[in-house]
């Protein structure tokens, strides 16, 4: 068992090695990304503030991520509730199609959407990226919301109806508050996925790039790398914070319905 | 609850109620009347349709056929939220995100009462179930017994005409269950509301109910008082389900209107009174008689009796302290029977393999088709 | 709640009340299946319009041809013939398959001990912390992570400068960047949580008394693992394999950044056909071939697994 623990620690080092480098070189006073380090600087972070194209990309990405998260979560609520509460013929096939993007190579989703949009003569833009991102985020939302809806006793809603509430008001008074932590964590996860997603954005974006597409463009220029490192540090930090919040809400949901904690996402 | 003519009217009337899911029949023609203020039980093995029937009365399942009236009103197209029934769910369905008081007062949201009046009603309801002062507690931190009390208070606060209880005691341990059985009875007498209890536990049904409907495969096999059900089961199935019953092959002949003669394997001939016969009986259909273990006794060596005596052998026994259960095979019978004996002072416990003289009465025989 | 009827005058009132309720809440009476369809309709229609229809369009497109900007909509197998006869495409498809299989094997084999460690050695109260630790890197920007591997593995990269600086090697290692090895390492890193989680879930489901029963019946630790733990963990391993294998075959970023000319994969060619060569039908044909390949390999794998599980009984 000791060797297994050692292996686990080495594995964690392997997992964290790349992102551990981010802050190291983000604060390194040198344009070449190599050891030994040259000294401490905040210059790369300051430079981030002076690039209008970057700011535009960030804003664009935020708008896309918020829209995608909202739409994906709404669709996710519908699918998760239908899947956990009702039995209907063809359920497996229908939910299978909705979950398909989880295992489909992203490039396939991207090119197939691109072909259809171009054939229909529709202009590419942020909204086409949203269309694609919703497709990618919905399965994740469903996976999170499924566990929220599943842990819900069916008789809770029946009890509310029995006590005089209508179907809708019992959903609003009982189900919604109980799955709210799941909804919030679904919003955060979908937001994070959309913010990071590159391939679909790369194919479907119009003239305004998203943040990952902007970064992709900068990777070709070696002198821009330290700035990208600084940007990456901020992004990782933001992701971790969002994720921690999502995890907090998920756990609160678990505690609220009073069941045992079965572990993390997915 | 009397109508204009002063005739007692049932609080719930079921007329040929049917429920099917596709090809599967859950309820096949249930007819029964449940009286105002009685403690009524639906008893049967799992899958017999008792829970479906309860949920039909509550309005969670729609009827596929037949008629259901509650307090004289047809319940067709009346949704669950406006029916004058409230339910205690098997899982109790306590809302985990609300406090005890919010749970109990949940149904008052739509009542035209002031805040103070609602708080007073909640306090009264909690008092009634023995949870005074628990109002501010978080619901998910309660024990099983407390959850059940909250569920009861929450359902009773709306003063329903009928309270429906879906296996409310099955999740509790034995001690707690016995305590709640007494308490539920007390509560029912106190509020005077009709209670309908679904249970698979025959002992629980016998202890608590005024009347019991025994259900098998979507039909009511017998609807009677606990005593009648135990003493005079209509069918072998009912006799077997409630308590323990021994069955012996038998034939019957009618000599005249008042004397029916039965010839039972191992016991011999006996004369039966007409009131021991099941309804609609005719002699040709009798194939067996049933007899309860405690209506027989094994005579210890030298003991005499003026009851009928049959001879057999003790095959096995289980000693319970207060009671001993003997497995006895009567001479000329294939299947052994169970006989229970109180362990009175001076009465010896017989060994395996000894001869048993079994004393019995013709009055305790029940005839079955 | 219906008020008790006290006189004949009250009856119409009550009826009215009930009718209003029914009209206002027609869904209360609706059948379960209808409610299910009603709810699932929005996400289903979305997936139908934006996933199923475009996928069908891609298949249709692959039978068309394009010459610069003119699209010829006559159905033909020309693209497929070209894709299968031109060694360039064939090599790319084969290489994608081999790299994906290598990534899958590497990821799942290295992930299994981690999942086993978390499930069996970590105390229950700290399990979710470990799972959280493992998922965090996955949520940081994929693009950044791949790029950072380039920084680590490069000729003048972190690994080489550190190793030469420590005197372990004299010359920078060159076999670790701009080739298939780099692609395998990077993708194995990117898909680690996808492999660990399903295996972990499967291991968690194993009733621990089964293992004790096996020991009790005279099996050693190793044999218990082989005869009880591994077969019961198989569904998780299968899920891990599929969830890693399927998306990696279509990966674009990794081969492009760390693969070099000999590490490029089919997705890069699909992108080139669509965005650079303006030959969307050829790109569509390659995409369909890639999907067909993924499906075929997945089915073979599922079939083998079923045979394996049957042999266990």
Image: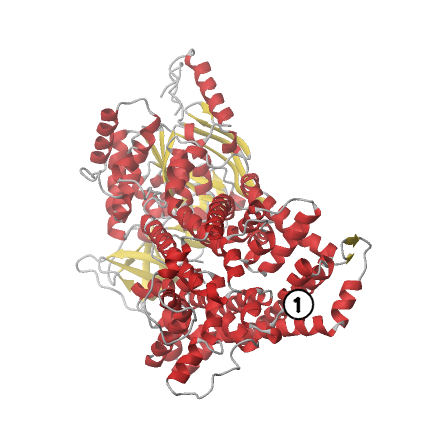
Q: How crowded is mark 1: few (under 14 residues within 10 Å), some or many (20 or more)?
A: some
The vertical placement of C123 against B261, above or below, is below
Kindly tell me whether residue A183 is visible in this rendering: yes
Question: Disc 1 is attached to a residue of which chain?
Answer: C
Residue C286: image location, x then y, percent: 69, 64
Q: In this view, does B103 lie to the left or right of A146?
A: left
Residue B281: image location, x then y, percent: 50, 40
Residue C174: image location, x then y, percent: 52, 82
- Which quadrant does the N terminus of chain A fall into? bottom left
SS of the residue under disc 1: helix
Residue B93: image location, x then y, percent: 35, 43
- Which quadrant does the C terminus of chain A fall into? bottom left
Which sits in the foreground, B273 or C6?
C6
Which sits in the foreground, A142 or A69?
A69
Q: In this view, does B287 lie to the left or right of B329?
A: right
The residue under label 1 is C293
């Amino acid at each position: 068992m000791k060797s297994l623990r050692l292996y686990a620690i080495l594995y964690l080092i392997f997992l964290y090695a790349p992102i551990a480098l981010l802050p190291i070189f983000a604060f390194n006073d040198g344009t070449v990304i190599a050891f030994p380090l040259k000294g401490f600087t905040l210059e790369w972070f300051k430079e981030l503030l002076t690039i209008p194209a970057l700011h535009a990309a960030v804003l664009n990405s935020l708008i896309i991520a918020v829209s995608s998260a909202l739409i994906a979560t709404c669709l996710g609520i519908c699918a998760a509730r239908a899947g956990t509460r009702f039995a209907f013929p063809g359920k497996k096939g229908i939910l299978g199609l909705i979950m398909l993007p989880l295992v489909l190579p992203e490039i396939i989703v991207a090119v197939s959407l691109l072909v259809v949009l171009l054939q229909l003569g529709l202009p590419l833009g942020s909204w086409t990226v949203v269309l694609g991102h919703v497709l990618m985020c919905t399965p994740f939302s469903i996976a999170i919301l499924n566990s929220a809806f599943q842990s819900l006793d069916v008789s809770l809603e029946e009890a509310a109806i029995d006590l005089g509430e209508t179907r809708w008001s019992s959903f609003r008074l009982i189900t919604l508050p109980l799955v709210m932590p799941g909804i919030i964590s679904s919003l955060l996860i979908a937001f994070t996925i959309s913010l990071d997603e590159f391939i679909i954005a790369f194919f479907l974006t119009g003239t305004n790039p998203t943040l990952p597409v902007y970064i992709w463009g900068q990777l070709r220029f070696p002198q821009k790398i330290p700035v990208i490192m600084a940007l990456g540090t901020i992004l990782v930090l933001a992701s971790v914070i969002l994720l921690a919040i999502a995890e907090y809400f998920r756990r609160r949901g678990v505690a609220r319905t009073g069941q045992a904690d079965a572990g993390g996402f997915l | 609850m009397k109508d204009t003519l002063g005739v007692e009217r049932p609080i719930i009337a079921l007329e040929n109620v049917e429920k099917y899911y596709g090809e599967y029949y859950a309820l096949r023609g249930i007819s029964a009347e449940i009286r105002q203020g009685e403690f009524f039980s639906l008893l049967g093995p799992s899958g017999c349709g008792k829970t479906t029937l309860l949920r039909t009365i509550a309005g969670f399942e729609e009827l596929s056929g037949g008629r259901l009236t509650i307090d004289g009103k047809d319940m067709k197209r009346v949704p669950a939220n406006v029916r004058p029934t409230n339910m205690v769910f098997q899982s109790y369905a306590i809302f985990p995100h609300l406090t005890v008081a919010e749970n109990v007062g949940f149904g008052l949201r739509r009542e035209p009462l002031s805040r103070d009046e609602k708080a007073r009603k909640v306090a009264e309801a909690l008092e009634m179930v023995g949870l005074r002062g628990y109002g501010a507690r978080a619901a998910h931190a309660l024990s099983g017994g407390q959850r059940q009390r909250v569920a009861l208070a929450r359902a009773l606060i709306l003063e329903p005409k009928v309270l429906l209880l879906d296996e409310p005691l099955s999740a509790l341990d034995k001690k707690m269950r016995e305590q709640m059985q007494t308490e539920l009875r007390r509560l029912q007498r106190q509020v005077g509301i009709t209670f309908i209890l679904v249970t698979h536990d025959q002992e629980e049904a016998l202890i608590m109910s005024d009347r019991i409907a025994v259900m098998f495969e979507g039909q009511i096999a017998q609807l009677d008082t606990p005593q009648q059900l135990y003493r005079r089961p209509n069918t072998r199935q009912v006799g077997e389900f409630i308590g323990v019953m021994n069955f012996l092959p038998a034939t019957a002949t009618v000599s005249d209107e008042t004397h029916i003669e039965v010839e039972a394997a191992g016991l011999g001939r006996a004369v039966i009174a007409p009131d021991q016969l099941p309804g609609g009986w005719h002699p040709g259909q009798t194939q067996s008689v049933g007899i309860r273990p405690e209506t027989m006794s094994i005579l210890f060596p030298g003991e005499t009796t003026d009851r009928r005596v049959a001879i057999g052998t003790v095959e096995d026994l289980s000693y319970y302290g207060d009671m001993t259960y003997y497995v006895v095979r009567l001479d000329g019978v294939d299947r052994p029977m169970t006989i229970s004996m109180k362990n009175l002072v001076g009465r010896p416990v017989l060994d395996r393999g000894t001869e048993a003289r079994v004393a019995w009465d013709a009055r305790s025989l029940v005839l079955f088709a | 709640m219906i008020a008790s009827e006290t006189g004949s005058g009250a009856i119409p009132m009550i009826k009215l009340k009930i009718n209003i309720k029914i009209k206002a809440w027609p869904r209360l009476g609706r059948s379960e299946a209808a409610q299910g369809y009603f709810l699932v309709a929005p996400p289903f229609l979305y997936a139908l319009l934006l996933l199923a229809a475009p996928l069908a369009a891609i298949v249709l497109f692959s039978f068309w041809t394009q010459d610069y900007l003119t699209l010829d909509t006559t159905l033909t197998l020309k693209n497929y013939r070209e894709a299968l006869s031109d060694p360039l495409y064939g090599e790319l498809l084969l290489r994608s398959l081999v790299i994906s299989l290598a990534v899958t094997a590497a990821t799942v084999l290295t992930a299994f001990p981690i999942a086993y460690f978390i499930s069996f050695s970590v105390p229950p109260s700290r399990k979710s912390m470990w799972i959280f630790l493992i998922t965090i890197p996955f949520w940081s920007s994929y693009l950044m992570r791949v790029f950072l591997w380039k920084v680590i593995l490069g000729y003048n990269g972190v690994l080489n400068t550190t190793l030469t600086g420590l005197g372990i090697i004299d010359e920078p290692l060159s076999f670790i960047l701009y080739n298939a090895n780099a692609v395998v390492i990077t993708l194995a890193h990117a898909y680690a949580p996808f492999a660990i989680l399903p295996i972990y879930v499967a291991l968690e489901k194993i009733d621990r008394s089964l293992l004790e029963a096996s020991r009790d019946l005279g099996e050693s630790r190793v044999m218990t693992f082989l005869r009880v733990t591994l077969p019961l963990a198989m569904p998780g391993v299968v899920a891990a394999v599929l969830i890693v294998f399927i998306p990696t075959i279509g990966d674009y970023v990794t081969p492009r950044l760390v693969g070099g000319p000999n590490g490029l994969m089919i997705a890069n060619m699909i992108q080139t056909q669509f965005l650079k060569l303006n030959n969307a039908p050829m790109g569509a044909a390659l995409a369909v071939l890639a999907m067909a390949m993924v499906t075929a390999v997945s089915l073979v794998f599922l079939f083998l697994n079923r045979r394996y599980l049957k042999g266990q009984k």
